[in-house]
Amino acid sequence: MNHITWEDAFCGEGNNCFRIGVDNAGYAYIAVSGAEGHYVRDTRDALRALVCDIKAGKADHLL
């Protein structure tokens, strides 16, 4: 298993904190802060596309 390097938590209002991490094999990870053992993993390009789409408002209908 590759070592995941986690960034500091990104927190919204209250306790809604997420962490993003990367490994040396080119994968990116997203987890709830405090539960990093349960994560979503994909390529860094996929994570980049997700973040860009969220910033562009493509997920606003989910809020």
Image (cartoon, rainbow, N blue to C red):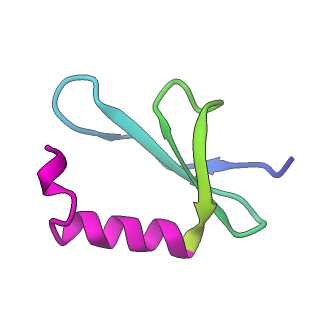
Q: Residue at x 21, y 58 (%)?
A: 59
Query: In this orientation, which residue lies closer to the viewer: 49 or 19?
Result: 49
What residue is rendered at 28% in x and 70% in y? 53
Using the image as rendered, state which of residue 51 and residue 61 is in the foreground. Answer: 61
The single residue placed furthest to the right in the displayed view is: 1
Look at the picture and state if 57 lies above or below 5. Answer: below
Find residue 63 and report its horizontal and vertical position in percent: 13, 43
**Residue at the (27%, 23%) spot, across then down:** 15
**Would you say 50 lies left or right of 35 here?**
left
Q: How many marks?
A: 0
Read off the magenta span.
45-63
Q: Quadrant of residue 44?
A: bottom right
Residue 11 on image: x %, y %: 28, 38
Residue at the image position 21 percent from the left and 37 percent from the top: 12
51 in the magenta segment: yes
Image location of residue 43, percent across then percent down: 62, 68
Q: Residue furthest front?
A: 61
Residue 31, above or below 50: above
> Is 8 placed left or right of 56 in the picture?
right
Q: Is residue 46 above or below residue 6?
A: below
Residue 21 appears left or right of 48: right
Q: Position of residue 41 (x, y in %)?
A: 62, 52
**Is the stretch drawn in magenta largely helix, strand or loop?**
helix
